[in-house]
Amino acid sequence: MRPAIEVQGLGVRFRRNRRGRRSFKDLFSGASRRSRPGEFWALRDVTFTVQPGESIGVVGRNGQGKSTLLRLVAGVLLSDEGSVKVNGGVAPLIEITGGFVGDLTVRENVRLTAGLHGMSRDEVTRRYDGIIAFAELAGFEDTPYKHLSNGMKVRLAFSVVSQLDEPILLVDEVLAVGDKAFRDKCYTRIDELLAEGRTLFFVSHNERDLRRFCTRGLYLDKGALVLDAPITDVLDRYNADYNAR
């Protein structure tokens, strides 16, 4: 069986001062020569493999490359070094309210967003009532998306994306928003997806969530992968490092 995710020598570089520009000559020089003042590596030389059905939790302090790694796996960010290979489609619960159109209604946004993620028109129609019910938006279907509260927007986005049949689920802090009742619904839905054999790639600062959903952890620090081990070992190492700082 092919791995669900293969990451080899991955590196991505950002610039602190966005006003700086690279010269034409820089584009044809080696990677080391192209580095300029103000640039830094958000991730560097990261390598790991995820097997189908694994539940991976990505651990680290803010600014250590966790969400960057998730975006690279999702294919919304390109690397400067190395490679990411994803064998199968992804259901991305990252920046989940992105892609919704403010002037379109809830109904129109469900059909548009689900369609953009590859769901057929018939499938959208079949699942539409369930999406609205899960999001608790009955009665708001003809309301423009821009008039929804932030909580409503998150509920709608989670409801749509969690209905996708993709084998790989990418989750970035989405469970940190919304009220407790809705979080409990999200937990149950993720449990159902894992029971179906989906692969989970999960970024969170919530240790309880990481222990609940994940069996393996990746610990990132200063853009480097410092530990790939069972989630309990990774969290113990992270907590020890955090307390030692």
Image (tube, rainbow, N blue to C red):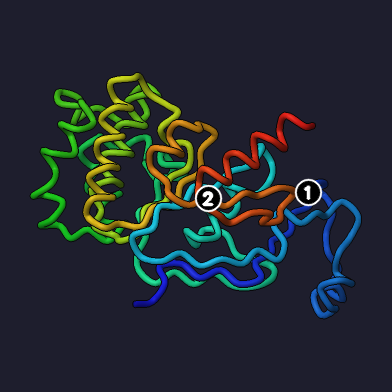
Quarter of the figure with the C terminus: top right
Q: Nearer the viewer, mark 1 or mark 2?
A: 2
Percent coordinates x, y for residue 227 in the rendering = 64, 54
> In which quarter of the view is residue 94 placed?
top left
Relative horizontal placement of residue 9, taking residue 57 as reference (left or right): right
Q: Position of residue 108 (x, y in %)?
A: 23, 42
Instruction: Give the image location of residue 73, x and y in percent.
Output: 50, 60
Q: Earlier in the sequence, mark 1 or mark 2?
A: 1
Residue type beneath disc 2: Gly
122 vs 109: above or below: below
Q: Write the residue at 34% across / 35% down.
A: 103
- According to the picture, the residue beneath numbered tag 1 turns out to be 18
Question: Is the N terminus in the top left, top right, bottom left or bottom right quadrant?
Answer: bottom left
Residue 82 higher or lower than 222, as above or below: below
Is residue 49 in view from this perspective? yes
The relative height of residue 19 versus residue 153 in the rendered view (above or below) is: below
In this orientation, does residue 109 appear?
A: no
- State how far apart marks 1 and 2 are (Cα): 33 Å
Q: Position of residue 64 (x, y in %)?
A: 69, 45
In the rendered structure, the answer to whether residue 12 lies left or right of residue 69 reads right
What is the crowding at mark 2: few (fewer than 14 residues within 10 Å), some, or many (at least 20)?
Answer: many
Query: SS at mark 1?
Result: loop
Which one is in front, 83 or 243? Answer: 243
Image: 40 above or below 130: below
- Residue ID at (36%, 24%): 151
Say if mark 1 contacts mark 2, CB within 8 Å. no
Q: Tag on residue 217?
A: 2
123 left or right of 73 in image: left
Q: Give the SS element for disc 2.
A: strand
Identify residue type, mark 1: Arg
Residue under the point 37% across and 35% down: 102
Q: Identify the residue shown where x is 39% and y is 52%.
A: 200
